[in-house]
Amino acid sequence: MKHSEQELLILKDEVIEMWKFVISQLEKSKKALLFDDIELAREIISREKRVDLYELKIESDCENHIALYCPVAIDLRLVLSLIKITSSLERIGDFTEGIARHVVQENCSILTPQLVEDLKLENMFDLVIGMLTDTYALFNSAKTEVYGKILCKDDDVDEIYKKSFNTITQHLINNPLMIRNGLELILLVRKLERIGDYCSNLVEDVVFYVDAKVLKHSNGSKLENDAE
């Protein structure tokens, strides 16, 4: 095996390690929110710096690889995709940390079991965790036949997000003193919706690497305006 090929495998392993870490963070954020686990939320926040360090190192390693080896064809697509993948994973990590901060700051104290059910929060978490995990498997296997099923989950996330406004509005009509908490709750649901968008971005990057196929402009990118 050539030295450049060994370096590519190392780069890929670094991204896999980062990906697994971000999945763990997202799974923990679900538990922290649904069970109001402040200690777990603090752990998520303290571990977020690792995600940033992953991104900086991988991006630097990818740039060095391009400068040293001038990769072409699938090798170049892989390196370029790794840079974009780590950027998306870092953003997902940021949103996950944001969810944890809602828990620590008790911004979502109005989250009763009934409201969680009405908002389909647990379902929304399961969808984005599933998207992130399935795309990780897609990257590992380099088999992209099922990418459409993953992207369909983002449509489900968007549908839940759209319906959440009416649900929260109705709750605030019945509880007018909780307006601030209601606004914080909208921001929280928005973070989950954005995670779904970035998971779609990951799918696009994996398909580009494996199949040299560009999906972004055929589906339309939802990440141009990254408001949180």
Image (cartoon, rainbow, N blue to C red):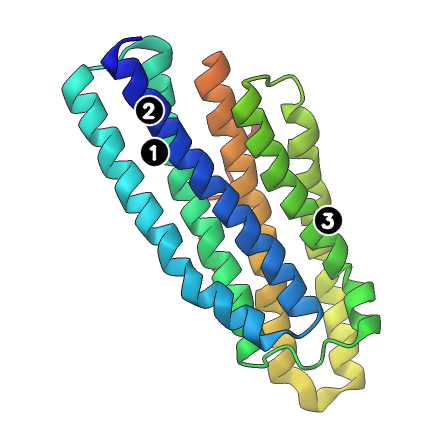
Using the rendered view, name the quadrant where residue 144 is placed: top right
Mark 3 vs 1: CB contact within 8 A? no
Task: Kindly identify which numbered label has been placed on residue 159.
Answer: 3
Q: CA distance from mark 3 to mark 1?
A: 30 Å
Whether residue 218 is visible, yes or no, is no
- Depth check, mark 3 against mark 2: the one in front is 2
Task: Kindly identify which numbered label has been placed on residue 131.
Answer: none
Q: Earlier in the sequence, mark 3 or mark 2?
A: 2
Residue at 19% from the left image edge and 16% from the top image edge: 69
Q: CA distance from mark 2 to mark 1?
A: 6 Å
- Give neighbour class at mark 1: few <14, some 14-19, many 20+ (Cα, 10 Å): many
Q: Which residue is mark 1?
A: 83
Q: Which residue is mark 2?
A: 79
145 relative to 157, above or below: above
Q: Position of residue 51 (x, y in %)?
A: 39, 51
Q: Position of residue 194 (x, y in %)?
A: 55, 51
Q: Of the residues shown, which amino acid type is indicated by label 3?
A: Glu
